[in-house]
Amino acid sequence: MSRPLDLASQNQLPHPANPFLSPSTDPYNPLRYIASNTLTGVAFTLYMVSALTMSVWMWRRGAQWMGAMVVGAYTFSAGIGLRIYIAEYLFVVLSPCAFIAADYVLLGHLAQHLNMDRHLLVKPRLITRLFISSDVTTFLIQAAGGSLSISGSTSNDLTKAHTGSRIFLAGLAMQLISFFAFTMLFLRFLARVRTHAPHVWNPTPTPVWWRHWRTLSAALCVSCVGILIRSAYRTVELSQGFQGPLAVSEGFFYGLDTFPLLLAIAVYVPFWPGQFINEESALAFAVPKEDKEGTLSAVEEGREKASV
């Protein structure tokens, strides 16, 4: 999304003789800082390595349903690598929608794999449909706001540009609220499994930690924290305006956006879901199957009654 043109550019002020001298006051510098080639190169490399590695894992270890995260990692890498501001901003801001979608799908698959559907507030398929629909909706709102802002900027229509930024902000805020609700749902799921299904929480025989489903759950927790940090940062940043203290600081961009999102996806490089959610691990966990009505075992029924 292009930064709205300010009055200086509309009045055709001359470009500064040395754009590196004072980028924070340069009306023709949309970032208000000189991007670091070193930070850009490091970030691009880390995201691209993560994307390539996850592509290999998806091919060799399965879990093709994590494809959204892989695609998002490539587009985010493109956003970091491009120095065309509009394209860079759109890729960097919209790509995390794919990371969020992958986490939504992962929880549904994990609950079904453990046969612990009943410990979710809603059925796994409904969770996926509900939150994916929310993700798509917020993506479209952000894309519409970005397009409107770009249109206003290119036509020197500040009213349209600011309207677009407000629409974009609404999309970011809705996305933050939706993902926070998902995170709470996930934590509640873990708490209920630990309390009401100890045979699943501590399966016998106990698998090695790098094959244990709780390790994958920990990875999902890390991913959720990274996405929440980024979402909160972007919401506050845009609420301050395009020239607010967060928007014009490269340090904040890398510290509260790029790095948390890298953590959110790179955590799956060593802990790819396909190595946890497969037929072999399902047998190793020895999770007792429910009957067609989904009735609980006598032990679990007692726990359920005791918790009421």
Image (cartoon, rainbow, N blue to C red):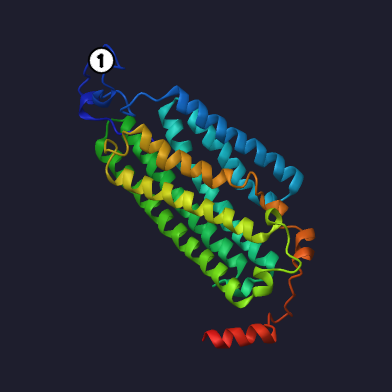
Closer to us: 156 or 137 = 137
Q: Is residue 38 above or below residue 113?
A: above
Q: In the figure, is residue 18 to the left or right of 268?
A: left
In the rendered image, is residue 82 in sight? no
Q: Is residue 7 above or below residue 132?
A: above
Q: Quadrant of the N terminus?
A: top left
- Residue 47, located in which quarter of the rendered image? top right
Q: Which residue matches tag 1? A: 16
Could you say where residue 203 lies in the image, as x and y percent from the top left?
71, 68
Q: Residue at x 56, y 65 (%)?
A: 127
- Residue 253, located in which quarter of the rendered image? top left
Could you say where residue 88 lies in the image, as x and y percent from the top left?
45, 32
Crowding near pointer 1: few (<14 within 10 Å), some, many (20+)?
some
Q: Residue at x 62, y 87 (%)?
A: 302
Could you say where residue 141 lies in the image, as x and y percent from the top left?
42, 49
Q: Is residue 113 above or below residue 300?
A: above
Which residue sits furthest top?
A: 17
Q: In the figure, is residue 253 to the left or right of 241?
A: right
Helix, strand or loop status at disc 1: loop
Q: In the figure, is residue 30 to the left or right of 255?
A: left
The residue type indicated by label 1 comes to Pro
Closer to us: 223 or 181 = 223
Closer to us: 217 or 167 = 217
Q: Residue at x 74, y 43 (%)?
A: 59
